Image (cartoon, rainbow, N blue to C red):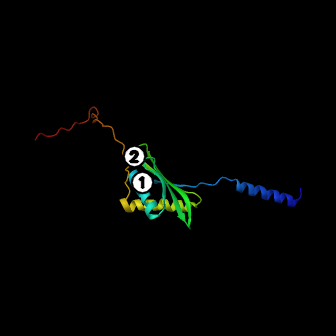
């Protein structure tokens, strides 16, 4: 096999691998320090009003919002997922995932940053969760060692 034939074969293999490679689906996630309801309301307003994106589907109970992100005259499908969870102390945690197909990750990062900023502007500073303070078991006063002087309070 000649050098030209090997080069052509290598080019075909590279082209075929690019052609049939799976499309990367990036998404940006972050934890939000606001309530689920506040996060949902801010996400809807941000997508519909601030970004003027048409909402194609939404389900508040299951925490998803589908929309069409408009850029340079084209439309790209996007989603916002809001997931509730509870940590080991029983504190509610909110995780948000933003995904816009065929757009660079910085678009999703911009949207998540904008949502965080919108929450702060609309609802003030986020709630602060204080770390749980361990409770001490009640300690009964120890008896003085044998032979130690005992103080007696004077009578009034």
Q: Nearer the viewer, residue 133 or 39?
A: 39
Q: Is residue 11 visible?
A: yes
In percent of width and height, residue 82 lies at: 46, 51
Q: Is residue 97 visible?
A: no
Question: Residue lying furthest left in this view?
Answer: 156
Q: Give neighbour class at mark 1: few <14, some 14-19, many 20+ (Cα, 10 Å).
A: many
In this picture, residue 155 sits left or right of residue 71: left
Residue under the point 42% across and 60% down: 45
Placement of the C terminus among the 4 image quadrants = top left
* Residue 144 numbered tag: none
Q: Which residue is mark 1?
A: 40
In percent of width and height, residue 75 lies at: 55, 62
Q: Give neighbour class at mark 2: few <14, some 14-19, many 20+ (Cα, 10 Å).
A: few
Number of numbered discs? 2
Q: Is residue 62 above or below residue 71?
A: above
Q: Which residue is mark 2?
A: 91
Q: Nearer the viewer, residue 81 or 146?
A: 81
Which label sits in the foreground, 1 or 2? 1
Q: Helix, strand, or loop for circle 1?
A: helix
In this picture, residue 19 sits left or right of residue 146: right
Residue under the point 26% across and 33% down: 147
In this picture, residue 75 sits left or right of residue 34: right
Residue under the point 78% across and 59% down: 11
Question: Residue lying furthest bottom in this view?
Answer: 72
Q: Nearer the viewer, residue 10 or 145?
A: 10
Question: Which picture quadrant has residue 6?
Answer: bottom right
Q: Nearer the viewer, residue 20 or 137?
A: 20
Q: Is residue 108 above or below residue 91?
A: below
Question: Which picture quadrant has residue 86?
Answer: top left
Q: Helix, strand, or loop for circle 2?
A: loop
């Amino acid at each position: 096999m000649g050098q030209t034939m090997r080069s052509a074969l290598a080019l075909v293999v590279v082209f075929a691998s690019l052609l049939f490679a799976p499309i990367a689906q990036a998404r940006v996630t972050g934890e939000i320090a606001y309530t689920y309801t506040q996060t949902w309301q801010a996400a809807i307003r941000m997508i519909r009003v601030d970004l003027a994106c048409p909402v194609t589907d939404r389900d508040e109970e299951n925490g998803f919002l589908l929309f069409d992100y408009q850029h340079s005259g084209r439309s790209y499908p996007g989603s916002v997922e809001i997931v509730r969870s509870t940590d080991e102390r029983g504190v509610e945690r909110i995780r948000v995932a933003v995904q816009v197909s065929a757009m660079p990750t910085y678009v999703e990062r911009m949207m998540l940053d904008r949502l965080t900023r919108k929450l702060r502007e609309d609802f003030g500073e986020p709630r602060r969760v204080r770390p749980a303070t361990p409770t001490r078991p009640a300690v009964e006063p120890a008896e003085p060692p044998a032979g130690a002087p005992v103080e007696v309070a004077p009578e009034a």
